[in-house]
Image (spheres, helix red, strand yellow):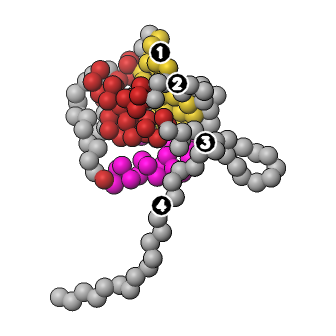
């Protein structure tokens, strides 16, 4: 199958988007056992291209970096060709760089491209690049944008069921 791992500092809005996507159940678009191809990589990173993130290729690595350089997505073509080992082929990160991230999510080769595209979309719109800063005055974020607040649902009486 596939493996996805998030660090403990991954922002709640990013994790919430991830869980919502998994709950929808429509993201199982990457066939198990099939090699990762250019179409899958393009699909997973399209939101970054649309947001004009910088794309570079360095040997086995393809990287998309935000205009500010504070977030990115990295794809390792070498590990993607060895899917039976479930090694991380994808790294989604925010912070100084992929080797020193403030938070990161890694994913194996067969992680659904629609799930990766969803995470790319969140990153491209800065919901995932916010970082807590220690200022001595309590928690704050480095970005002015905030994730949308889910609507509150009023509690209603439980419906009675009979058999």
110, above or below 163, in the image: above
Q: Which mark is residue 130?
A: 3
Q: Nearer the viewer, mark 3 or mark 4?
A: 4
Q: Nearer the viewer, mark 4 or mark 2?
A: 4
Q: Which residue is mark 4?
A: 150
Horizontal arrangement in the rendering, residue 138 relative to residue 65 (left or right): right
Residue 57, given in percent of the width and then of the height, sits at: 45, 13
Locate the C terminus and report the quarter of the image it occupies: bottom left
Image point 21% across, 89% down: which residue?
162
Sequence-first disc among 3 and 4:
3
Image point 22% across, 34% down: which residue?
31
Classify residue 102 by image quadrant.
top right
Bounds of the magenta segment: 4-23
Q: How many C-alpha atoms fall within 10 Å of the one at disc 4: few (<14), some, or many (≥20)? A: few
163, above or below 16, in the image: below
Image point 51% across, 54% down: which residue?
148
Q: Which residue is mark 2?
A: 65
Pick the residue in front: 98 or 5.
98
Residue 35, given in percent of the width and then of the height, sits at: 25, 24
Q: Which element type, helix, strand or loop, lies under badge 2?
A: strand
Q: Which residue is mark 1?
A: 56
């Amino acid at each position: 199958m596939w493996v996805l791992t998030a660090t403990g500092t991954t922002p709640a809005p990013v994790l919430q988007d991830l869980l919502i996507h998994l709950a929808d159940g429509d993201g199982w678009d990457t066939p198990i056992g099939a090699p990762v191809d250019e179409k899958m990589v393009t699909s997973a990173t399209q939101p970054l291209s649309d947001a004009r993130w910088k794309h570079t290729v360095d040997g086995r690595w393809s990287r998309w970096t935000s205009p500010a350089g504070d977030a990115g997505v990295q794809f390792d073509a070498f590990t993607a060709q060895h899917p039976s080992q479930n090694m991380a082929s994808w790294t989604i990160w925010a912070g100084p760089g992929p080797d020193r991230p403030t938070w990161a999510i890694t994913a194996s080769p067969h992680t659904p491209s629609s799930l990766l595209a969803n995470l790319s979309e969140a990153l491209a719109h800065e919901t995932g690049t916010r970082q807590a800063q220690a200022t001595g005055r309590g928690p704050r974020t480095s970005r002015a944008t905030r994730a949308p607040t889910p609507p509150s649902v009023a509690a209603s009486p439980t419906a009675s069921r009979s058999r």
